[in-house]
Amino acid sequence: MGLKKIHSALASALAVTAFTATGLFAATAYQNQVGYFTKGQKQMAVIGAEDKEISFKDSDGNEVFKVTAPKAETWLPAGDTAASLVDFSEIQTAGTYQAFIGDEKIGHPIIIADDALEDAAKASLKFFYFQRASIELTEEYADIYARAAGHPDTAVKYHSSTGIENSDSTFNGAKGWYDAGDYGKYIVNSGISTYTLLQLYQQNKEYFDKLNLNIPESKNTVPDILDEIRWNLEWMLTMQDPTDGGVFHKLTTLKFSGTVMPEKDVAARYAIGKSVTAAWNLAAVAALAAEIYSPYDEEFAIKCATAASKARWWAMHNEAAYFEQPAGVNTGTYIDGYPIDEEIWANAELYRISKNPVFTEVFTKYPFKKFRWKLQSWQTTYALAAFTIATNPDIFDMDI
């Protein structure tokens, strides 16, 4: 996974907007407003320009490329059936350009650069800092998004659904990232996010070893992306029951807080339920983390490896422990009644770092190549296992 591919993936998630010229042609152009790579494919969809000449000019007004807009056709990214797909990939010199029909501008300024999407990549990663629980976001690092600390989570209660009998006991479940739409923290949703970022680092160490995200840990010797990942990973580790290795499904209040700032949400917080999918998630994430953090903090790496092993053991002995929303709880469920993909994912990662053949038994139990594939999500993680296997052919040399 090269850096340009990473940036391209980020670009695909960026919204494109339209710009309508006010002149004779009234053509509407849809394009990537962030930027295009100098050597990459460059396209825009233009409505109302069929068979018209489109010229591209540099910042000095010099025409550098001209093309006739082809017949309108369906453009899948926009879902529009009346757009001419205009390709201007021949422009391979960095700079800022503008498209014209006659003397009328169409679209936004076109930015072409080797690092066209780097700012978007940095902003995407900095997002996780703003999702941090249990910490004040100061102006030094958060600028206009500075806020007070919310949810210290130093005395989290055990909901009866966890099986913990002592209702008065608590544990420290601090740190972690807030969920997408509420202040809860969910293992199976955190799992794919944390693992994806770990793989992002694993595949691009040289780049991320130098990247400064301007977070509180930026002055230490650990890559910033690993410091940010660790904020959530340390919380995930607190969600493992030390008595049996099982993993609590989520840490939330009993009901959603509503639209308030984090520090205003002071309702009691609980660890709720245990689930086989949460256990497999922790096993997969912690296994990869054990390898990655080893050069920086051996003690922490061992803690991760131990957690992964215990989570796997519990999951193997609790295969039907699917999460069910307890009565009186109405926060997010992240229910998944099919944990085979998580099991394959976790064991693939455990085998990759240990080479212990016991972890390949899953491939006999569930022949890998018989499963139908689709892109990964929190609920479907086959593709994560496939990525690990495909990028380590010397390790996974068996027929799976």
Image (cartoon, grey):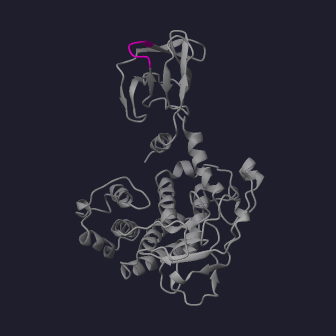
54 vs 250, nearest the viewer:
250
Residue 362 visible in the shown view: yes
Which sits in the foreground, 303 or 102?
102
Q: Residue at x 70, y 62 (%)?
A: 262
Q: List x then y, in percent, for residue 345.
A: 37, 65
Above or below for 110 versus 313: above
Q: Which residue is farthest front? A: 328
Work out which quarter of the rendered image holds the C terminus and state it: bottom left
Magenta region includes residue 50: yes
Q: Is residue 219 above or below residue 27?
A: below
Locate residue 64, reporting x and y percent. 49, 14
Q: Residue at x 74, y 47 (%)?
A: 144
Left or right: 342, with 172 as reference point: left
At horizontal 67% and vertical 78% (from top left) the residue drawn is 155
Place of residue 268 in the rendered image (x, y in percent of width and height, measured from the top left): 66, 75
Residue farthest to the bottom? 166
Relative to residue 24, is residue 12 depicted above or below? below
Q: Residue at x 41, y 15 (%)?
A: 67
Magenta stretch bounds: 48-53
In this orientation, does residue 298 appear? no
Our reading of the magenta stretch's main secondary structure is: loop
The residue lying toward the viewer, choosing from 331 and 123, is: 331
Query: Image quadrant of residue 310?
Result: bottom left
- Percent x, y for residue 206? 53, 50
- Report if residue 247 lies within the magenta region: no
Q: How many marks?
A: 0
Nearer the observer, 129 or 290: 129
